[in-house]
Every structure is written in structure tokens, then in C-alpha cells.
Image (tube, grey):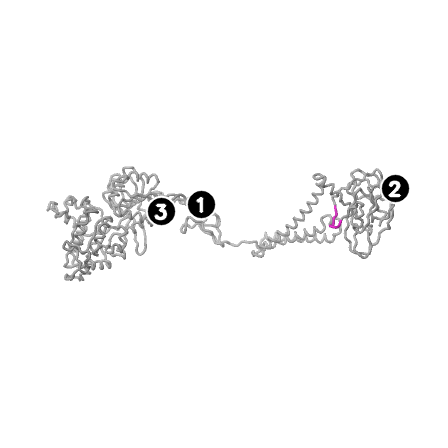
């Protein structure tokens, strides 16, 4: 079947291929021997005027009985092939399948025909659009493109292709940047301008030759250059478009076609047919407007034009006729010599045998799968559109059995001499170690982001994710793989470790030595001035902090990690705290007078004046109970030089006047100033007593304060021998310390002051 409204050379050529196949079978001695096949060709005028021809096929003596059983029904034909194109096939499909007439299609590639519930009698020798679209996607991925446009016609073939293209490009990284289904009178110029504006360099033209010719002519007219055009199966071998003037400027054209299989004897058949028709002047009357054997327009087509016409569907038609013949051969139970002619062949009987076919034909295997589709054997065609000579070269193959394999010879491509294939991507590919991050509406548009440390990107797994390394692995920033961690730690035998351990041992030994030295001289002023008991605490903490160093060597364990951090942090914090407290005391004493005078005046009320009693000290209290003894007394003098026995003494030094023997004389010219706190304050954390002359303080430290004399500005110190009595300032503080019980005795007998030398004082005996 072919359209009578618009005569085409390709349609006429397909008609001649069908005739050639029938003539070849009728002349065969092995296939259907003694059986002659007949055929009847109807003109598929349009989608709305094709029903008379279809009714003629399925009728019996001009009658159609829908309720008639299949066993009793005998249609005019036992098999049907055609019409050309998916839209025309869909129009007649319900009527053809009604009576289970076998229908072998050679040009209807729409994927809907694979549904055997809707089209149980349809088989086809042309691959489904599903396979064609999958091959398109493989070609796009082969060259690394992901930014493509899809152009089709306003027919079922293009609509089905677009739907499948969207379906199978999901999760492939390919983006349909622009798509449009054009009508015959559509605005092709605007479509191409939109594609050019979006920087799309790869265009899929999925349509029949009629629309494809309009698209390519518009591209030539709009001076569209350097694009890659991928053609679908119907127009990939179009000879008229190959020779179109200016086609060489539009860019590279890659076609998808079935592998070209030659038909031996077809050329001779065409020449013979044209020679026979020439004697008839090409004038054949066709009754009832049915084109049979030859049409008037065909008389003007030469044999060369028929032979050189687009061979895309030639083998499909040839295989369809042979499939029907082989099925009929089986139904008629034919052998090498003859067939049983007395059998009544029903259409459904032929359909059952068609589904079982598997035979070789001109080097290819003809069989149908469960969906009625043939084996896939595609080829990649490259158009050479030179001005003087144009031809089509096969540069690749595509097979789906036993596995899907696409092979393209890149050395035959036109960009083989360039540095790279044409670029048609939304975004530039990321460098190694960078993951993709979606940007915009399309999945193939992205920006690159460097993977951080301890992560990696696996492009084969997911190029949009930086995967974390395992716990036992690590990676640098911007990595594509993870490396196994190696355990590195300080060995006891390393030179650096030995030096650190030796230094630590020396430090610990020094600290222990100082600790023992301070313990031995615990009661000396030097030790007490350094802090007394607080010194031992600080030395012990420093020793323990140093011990934590040993836990940093050797293979680390959980216990080592805890101990080395805890021991150092805890004990060193205590040491620093002691230093802070001690420093705070010193700062408060020496800075208080300048910064806080009022507070300093309160402090000076309790300043300690020390002087060592030594062996000359006296016991305050005797008895069986524990007792307190005076530890130290110091006299603070002014900076004024004092004549006599005080000459050369500075502030803060002790002064004893031994000039008068057992009587201590204070000269009137010697000014006694208010006591100031000394730099060396020995406070062994014992009780302190401020001698103010108040009665309630008389029993502190186990001593009785002296009675006030005169105005009470001077006081007598109790416990000093008569040879070591001293004069004090206005305020005296005695620091007492606890003394364990001993058989203490007075060093010297107590004596009285001489009131004659100091007016205002009374003679009192110390208690």
C-alpha cells in the first residue's frame, strides 16, 4: 500500500520490492512448490478514506458477519502487510484484528503495537520505537552529550518517540533542553532560532521524511551551522535530502538504520520490469481507482531511480512476504515436491505458525519475540555531504542479542582530526575530586563542589554525592578514593622518645630531691617563707604531672588516653591554683596601700611583727595540757636612721637594744612609726592575736597581755627574757603556733621594766 494522493519514488520502490518477493517465491521450487501466491494492492488515500479497501480485505463475497465463528469465516485474504507509517496502521488496526487476520507490518514502529492484548494479530519486521530510542540514547552517551533538542512531527510516530525518549533518558544525565512537535505548515524558523539561542549543538530529528525535509531545508535557509543532527530510522537513508544544496553547511548528520541487506536479483527484476512496461507505453488503465501492478506515474520513474532509492524498508518488506510464505508452507504441510492443496487455510491457522517462525534470509535471521517484534540489527550511518560527491557510510553497529552492544568507529567521524567532539553539555564536567551540585531546572545543569577531607566522590556510583570514608580509612580534600589508615605512634625506642623520657626522669628526680630538702628544713624561715605546706602540695602535683608523659609512648589504648590527659590536667591545675593563690596574697599586700588605702588601713591593724625567739624564747604556759608558744617577732622601724645601736638598720629589720644589759632603753629621739607589713611574713597557718589591751583577748595563745600603762600607746611583750626586752610600735600582733607538750623551762628568769626610764609606764611583772 502507498499513498495515491502524493506519488513518491520511495513508495513506488517499496511496491516493486513486494512484487519482486512474490515473484521470487512463485518461482521457487523449495518454498511452496506448485503453489502460486497472489496479491492485491490498495491505495491508502487518507486516514478517513481507507475503510473501503479494508472492508474489501476482510469481507467474504462482499459480506461481513461480525458474529461469525472463526472456523466458519473465510476472508478474501489470508494475510496482510502494510500500510506505511504508524498513523495509518493505527487507523485500520481495529478492523484488521477483528477476524484474526495475520498482519505483518514493515513500517509501523510505534511501541503501542507491542501490546498483544490490543493487537494480537500484528507482527512486524521493523524494530519498535523502544529499541530505536534506546539506540539514540546510547549514541548520545557514547560522545558524552547531555544537552539535546528533540524535534518531531505531529503524528503518532513522533509522539511515541518523544514519550519514550523522556522515559528512557531519566537517570541517564541527558536533558531534553528543547522539544517540539511540528506540523507541516509549522514555524520551523522560530524553532531553530530557539535551539540556537539555548546553545544546543545536538538535535534529534525523530520524524518521517516529509517533516525531516522541512526541518533540514529550514536549517539551510537560516544558516544554521556546526550542529550534530541525529536522524531516526525513516529518513536516515534519504537520497533526495542527501543531495540537497547547502546540506553540507548544517553540520554532521548521523543516521540510524537497519543493517543494509542486499536483495540479489532485485536490480535485474527492475530493469526487466521497466523494459516490459516500455513496450506498453506506460499507459495502464486502472479500474475502480485501484493501483494494481503499475501506475501511470510509475512509468516516468527510471530503473536507476528505483534502484538508488532509499532502501530503508526494502528488507523489511522482503522479510514480511517471506514470513507469510514460510507460515503458509507449514500450514499446507509442504515437502520438497508439493503441498497439500485440499486443506482449507484459515487466517488464525497462519497466525499461529507465524509466531513460531525462525529461518535465515539473506544472511539475517527472521523470527519474532512474544510481542511480535523482530531481532534488532541496527547500523550507524554517517552522511558525507561533500559538494561534488555525497554518500552514506556505515560507521557503527548496534545489537541487543545476546547483550546490548554499541560500536562506533571514531576514526571515521568527521571530527577525528580535531581535539574533541562537538560540545553539547549544559555544564562543563567537574575536575577529579569534585562532586556535582544541582543548579537550575535540568538535572544535567550543575556546579562543581570540592569534596572535603575524609570523603570521596565516585562518579560511577553517584557524581552528586561526596561519600564518607570508612572509620578505618581517610582521604585528602578532593579525593576519588579513600586510603587505609596506618597506625603511627611514638615508640619507646625512638630517639626523640628516649630524649623526652630521659628529660622527664631527670625532672622527676629533681622534684623529689627538692621535696626531701624542704621536708628536712621544714621549720626554717626559708621553707616557711616559700609557702610551707603549700610547697609540698605544689611539688607533688608537678611530679604527678610529669609522670603523665610516660603514657604518651607505646601503642595507645583507651586507658592510656584517659590517664595521660586526666593526670596532667588535674594535678597541673592544682599546682597553678596554688601559685595563683600565693601570687594573689603578695599582690594584695604590696598593692593594697596604693590602690585601696582604706582597705590597707584595716589590714595594718593586724600586721605581724616578727622576731625569732630561738633558744631564748620563754614558755607561756606550763602544765599537762597542750600549749601555745610565740613563734616569731619582728620590729618595723622607719626609714630614718637611728643612732646608737639601731644605726644602719633599715625598715623591716629586727632591732634589739642591748646597751643597758637587762634593761632596754628607747631614746626619745627615735621615732616609732606605725608598723607596716613586711615582705617576709611567716604565717604557718596558725592563730593570730592582736594585742589591743582588751580584757577578752587576755587568754589567747595561753598568755596574759600586759596591763596598759599611761595612755596605753606602748605595750610590754611577755615572754622575752630580761636581756632581750624590746620596744614596739603602737600595734603589735603576736603570731602563735601550736607546740606539742614538752618539759619546757624558762631560759631566763623574768624581770621587771624600769619605769624610771620610761615615764608613763608602771612596773608590772609578766605573767
Residue 708's spot in the image, x, y percent? 83, 44
Task: Write down the residue under mark 3.
Answer: 174
Task: Between label 2 and label 1, give the one nearer the viewer.
Answer: 2
**Magenta highlight range:** 681-687
Q: How many marks?
A: 3
Task: Write down the residue under mark 1.
Answer: 449
Which of 742/299 is in front? 742
Residue 520's spot in the image, x, y percent? 74, 53
Q: In this view, does 590 lie to the left or right of 491?
A: right
Task: Between label 2 and label 3, give the one nearer the viewer.
Answer: 2
Task: Write down the residue under mark 2.
Answer: 757
- Calculate the distance from the C-alpha at mark 2 to the C-alpha at mark 3: 119 Å
Tell which residue pokes out farthest to the right in this image.
756
Which element is circle 2 on?
Answer: loop
Which element is circle 1 on?
Answer: strand
Q: Within 10 angstroms of label 1, few (less than 14), some, or many (20 or more) residues?
A: some
Above or below, 193 against 120 in this view is: above
- Residue 24 seen in render: no
Q: Within 10 angstroms of label 3, few (less than 14), some, or many (20 or more) residues?
A: many
Magenta run includes residue 554: no
When asked about the image quadrant of residue 627, the answer is: bottom right
Above or below, 609 against 494 in this view is: above
Which of 227/550 is in front? 227
- Residue 341 seen in render: yes
Q: In this view, does 492 lie to the left or right of 760?
A: left
Amino acid at each position: 500500500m502507498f499513498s495515491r494522493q502524493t506519488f513518491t519514488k520511495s513508495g513506488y520502490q517499496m511496491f516493486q520490492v513486494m512484487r519482486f518477493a512474490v515473484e521470487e517465491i512463485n518461482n521457487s521450487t523449495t518454498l511452496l512448490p506448485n503453489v502460486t501466491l497472489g496479491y492485491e494492492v490498495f491505495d491508502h488515500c487518507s486516514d478517513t478514506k481507507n475503510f473501503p479497501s479494508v472492508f474489501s480485505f476482510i469481507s467474504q463475497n462482499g459480506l461481513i458477519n461480525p458474529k461469525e465463528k472463526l472456523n466458519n469465516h473465510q476472508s478474501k485474504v489470508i494475510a496482510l502487510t502494510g500500510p506505511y507509517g504508524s498513523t495509518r496502521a493505527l487507523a485500520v488496526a481495529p478492523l484488521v484484528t477483528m477476524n484474526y487476520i495475520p498482519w505483518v507490518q514493515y513500517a509501523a514502529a510505534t511501541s503501542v503495537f507491542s501490546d498483544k492484548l490490543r493487537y494480537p494479530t500484528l507482527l512486524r519486521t521493523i524494530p519498535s520505537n523502544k529499541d530505536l530510542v534506546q539506540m539514540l540514547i546510547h549514541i548520545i552517551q557514547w560522545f558524552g552529550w547531555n544537552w539535546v533538542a528533540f524535534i518531531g512531527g505531529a503524528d503518532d510516530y513522533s509522539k511515541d518517540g518523544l514519550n519514550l525518549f523522556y522515559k528512557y533518558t531519566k537517570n541517564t544525565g541527558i536533558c531534553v533542553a528543547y522539544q517540539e512537535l511540528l506540523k507541516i505548515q509549522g514555524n520551523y524558523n522560530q524553532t531553530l532560532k530557539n535551539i540556537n539561542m539555548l546553545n544546543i549543538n545536538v538535535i534529534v530529528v525523530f520524524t518521517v521524511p516529509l517533516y525531516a525535509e522541512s526541518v533540514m531545508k529550514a536549517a539551510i535557509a537560516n544558516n544554521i551551522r556546526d550542529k550534530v543532527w541525529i536522524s531516526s530510522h525513516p529518513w536516515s537513508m534519504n537520497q533526495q535530502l542527501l543531495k540537497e544544496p547547502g546540506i553540507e553547511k548544517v553540520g554532521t548528520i548521523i543516521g540510524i538504520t537497519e543493517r543494509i541487506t542486499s536483495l540479489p536479483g532485485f536490480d535485474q527484476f527492475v530493469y526487466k520490469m521497466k523494459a516490459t512496461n516500455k513496450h506498453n507505453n506506460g499507459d495502464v488503465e486502472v479500474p475502480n481507482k485501484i493501483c494494481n501492478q503499475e501506475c501511470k506515474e510509475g512509468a516516468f520513474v527510471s530503473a536507476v531511480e528505483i534502484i538508488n532509492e532509499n532502501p530503508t524498508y526494502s528488507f523489511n518488506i522482503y522479510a514480511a512476504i517471506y514470513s507469510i510464505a514460510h507460515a503458509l508452507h507449514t500450514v499446507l504441510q509442504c515437502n520438497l515436491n508439493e503441498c497439500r492443496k485440499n486443506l482449507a487455510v484459515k487466517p488464525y491457522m497462519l497466525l499461529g505458525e507465524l509466531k513460531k517462525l525462525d529461518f535465515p534470509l539473506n544472511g539475517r535471521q527472521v523470527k519474532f519475540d512474544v510481542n511480535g517484534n523482530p531481532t534488532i540489527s541496527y547500523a550507524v550511518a554517517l552522511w558525507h555531504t561533500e559538494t561534488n560527491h555525497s554518500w552514506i557510510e556505515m560507521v557503527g553497529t548496534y545489537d541487543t542479542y545476546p547483550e546490548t552492544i554499541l560500536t562506533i568507529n571514531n576514526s571515521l567521524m568527521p571530527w577525528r582530526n580535531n581535539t574533541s567532539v562537538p560540545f553539547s553539555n549544559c555544564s562543563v564536567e567537574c575536575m577529579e575530586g569534585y562532586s556535582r551540585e544541582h543548579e537550575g531546572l535540568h538535572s544535567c545543569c550543575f556546579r562543581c563542589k570540592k569534596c572535603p577531607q575524609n570523603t570521596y566522590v565516585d562518579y560511577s556510583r553517584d557524581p552528586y554525592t561526596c561519600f564518607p570514608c570508612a572509620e578505618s580509612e581517610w582521604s585528602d580534600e578532593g579525593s576519588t578514593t579513600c586510603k587505609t589508615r596506618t597506625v603511627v605512634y611514638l615508640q619507646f625506642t625512638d630517639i626523640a622518645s628516649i630524649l623526652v623520657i630521659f628529660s622527664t626522669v631527670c625532672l622527676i628526680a629533681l622534684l623529689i630531691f627538692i621535696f626531701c630538702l624542704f621536708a628536712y628544713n621544714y621549720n626554717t624561715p626559708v621553707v616557711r617563707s616559700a609557702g610551707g605546706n603549700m610547697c609540698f602540695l605544689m611539688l607533688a602535683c608537678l611530679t604527678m604531672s610529669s609522670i603523665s608523659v610516660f603514657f604518651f609512648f607505646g601503642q595507645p589504648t583507651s586507658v592510656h588516653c584517659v590517664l595521660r590527659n586526666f593526670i596532667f590536667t588535674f594535678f597541673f591545675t592544682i599546682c597553678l591554683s596554688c601559685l595563683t593563690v600565693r601570687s594573689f596574697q603578695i599582690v594584695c599586700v604590696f598593692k593594697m596601700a596604693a590602690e585601696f588605702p582604706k582597705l590597707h588601713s584595716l589590714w595594718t591593724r593586724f600586721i605581724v611583727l616578727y622576731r625569732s625567739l630561738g633558744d631564748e624564747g620563754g614558755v607561756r604556759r606550763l602544765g599537762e595540757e597542750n600549749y601555745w608558744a610565740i613563734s616569731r617577732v619582728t620590729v618595723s622601724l622607719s626609714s630614718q636612721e637611728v643612732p646608737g645601736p639601731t644605726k644602719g638598720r633599715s625598715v623591716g629589720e629586727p632591732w634589739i637594744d642591748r646597751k643597758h644589759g637587762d634593761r632596754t632603753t628607747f631614746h626619745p629621739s627615735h621615732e616609732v612609726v606605725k608598723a607596716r607589713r613586711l615582705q617576709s611574713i611567716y604565717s604557718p597557718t596558725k592563730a593570730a592575736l592582736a594585742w589591743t589591751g582588751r580584757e577578752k583577748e587576755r587568754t589567747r595563745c595561753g598568755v596574759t597581755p600586759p596591763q596598759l600603762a599611761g595612755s596605753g600607746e606602748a605595750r610590754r611583750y611577755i615572754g622575752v627574757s630580761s636581756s632581750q626586752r624590746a620596744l614596739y610600735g603602737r600595734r603589735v600582733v603576736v603570731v602563735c603556733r601550736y607546740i606539742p607538750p614538752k618539759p619546757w623551762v624558762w631560759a631566763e628568769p623574768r624581770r621587771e621594766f624600769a619605769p624610771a626610764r620610761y615615764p608613763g609606764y608602771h612596773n608590772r611583772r609578766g605573767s
